[in-house]
Image (tube, helix red, strand yellow):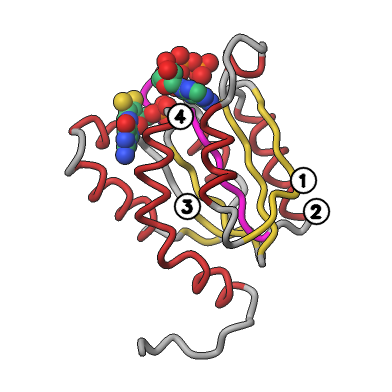
């Protein structure tokens, strides 16, 4: 089992104006692979988001951080920039497959600028803000997630497919 952190980036959510269905969707979809150790709703603010990622990765030693929201083209959408500022290695295949698969459902999938990367031994993945976007993106990543996390942690030696 892996430790999981969830960050919802939402001005409305942080002001208490909207129930965070997206964060809850992440938690329920990941119940089979780990335990949610930390969950927070923050405004769309680059420094606050970066600080949260650093705290969860460096102090709490969380294996997997999922963010939701703030990946679009809106003036306050800065989650990818907050993530890029604190990762040391990119994992481009994850957002590539999320966008590719999501495009089969909606052309608006191309509007998510989500990124994924590693900070030390923590994998950070951006997801779109809507509950549907979370569900559609997470379900394409899930089949490879446990293997990726095991490799990241040095717990799996072999990558060969059975
Ligand atoms: N965390 C969430 N929980 C539930 N629904 C959400 C959440 N985030 C987004 N949504 C839904 O997706 C739609 C589009 O999200 P968008 O990121 O544009 O939010 P927004 O209305 O600009 O506000 P904010 O950035 O404060 O979340 C919202 O109108 C809402 O219906
Ligand atoms: N799979 C999937 N991806 C999706 C969506 C969706 O409904 N399903 N919504 C798109 C829309 S409408 C937007 S604007 C962008 C960015 O969303 P965000 O700003 O809430 O992160 O994600 C896109 N990605």
Rendering coords of residue 81 (x, y %): 51, 37
Q: Is mark 2 within 8 Å of ligand 1?
A: no
**Residue 28 locus on image (x, y percent):** 56, 45
Labels 3 and 2 touching (C-beta < 8 A): no
Please give the residue where the numbered disc 2 appears in the rendered image: 60
Q: Are marks 2 and 4 in contact (CB under 8 Å)?
A: no
Residue behind label 4 places its C-beta within 8 angstroms of ligand 2? yes
Q: Which residue is mark 1?
A: 55
Magenta highlight range = 63-74
Residue 64: image location, x then y, percent: 61, 56
Q: Residue furthest right?
A: 59
Mark 1 / mark 4, whichever is N-terminal: 1
Q: Which residue is mark 3?
A: 116
Magenta stretch holds residue 73? yes
Q: Nearer the viewer, mark 3 or mark 4?
A: 4
Residue 75 visible at all:
no
Could you tell me if the residues under marks 1 and 2 are in contact, i.e. CB atoms within 8 Å?
yes
Q: Indicate the quadrant where residue 153 lies.
A: bottom right
As measured in the structure, the alpha-carbon distance from the residue carrying label 3 to the one carrying label 1 is 17 Å
Instruction: Residue 122: name its quadrant.
Output: bottom right
Q: Residue at x 57, y 22 (%)?
A: 44
Q: Dot 4: within a 10 Å radius of its alpha carbon, few (fewer than 14), some, or many (20 or more) residues? A: many
Percent of width and height locating residue 114: 41, 41
Mark 3 / mark 2, whichever is N-terminal:
2
Would residue 127 be found to the left or right of residue 140 on screen? Answer: right
The span from disc 1 to disc 2 (Cα, nearest Å) is 6 Å
Of callouts 3 and 1, the N-terminal one:
1
Please name the residue shown 66% across and 64% down the image. Answer: 2
What is the distance, in whole Å, between disc 1 and disc 4 at their CAs? 22 Å
Q: In this rendering, which labeled residue sits more in front, label 3 or label 2?
A: 2
Cα distance between the residues tagged 3 and 2: 19 Å
The residue that disc 4 covers is: 129
């Amino acid at each position: 089992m892996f430790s999981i952190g969830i960050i919802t980036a939402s001005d409305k959510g942080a002001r208490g104006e909207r129930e965070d269905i997206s964060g809850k969707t992440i938690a329920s979809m990941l119940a089979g692979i780990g335990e949610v150790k930390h969950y927070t709703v923050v405004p769309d603010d680059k420094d606050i988001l970066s600080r949260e990622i650093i705290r969860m990765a460096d102090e709490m030693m969380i294996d997997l951080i999922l963010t939701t929201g703030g990946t679009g083209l809106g003036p306050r959408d800065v989650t990818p920039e907050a993530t890029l500022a604190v990762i040391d290695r990119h994992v481009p295949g994850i957002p590539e497959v999320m966008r590719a698969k999501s495009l089969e459902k909606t052309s608006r999938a191309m509007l998510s600028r989500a990124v994924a990367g590693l900070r030390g031994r923590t994998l950070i993945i951006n997801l779109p803000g809507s509950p549907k976007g979370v569900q559609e993106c997470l379900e394409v990543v899930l089949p490879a997630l446990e293997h990726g996390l095991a490799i990241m942690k040095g717990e799996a030696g072999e990558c060969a497919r059975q």
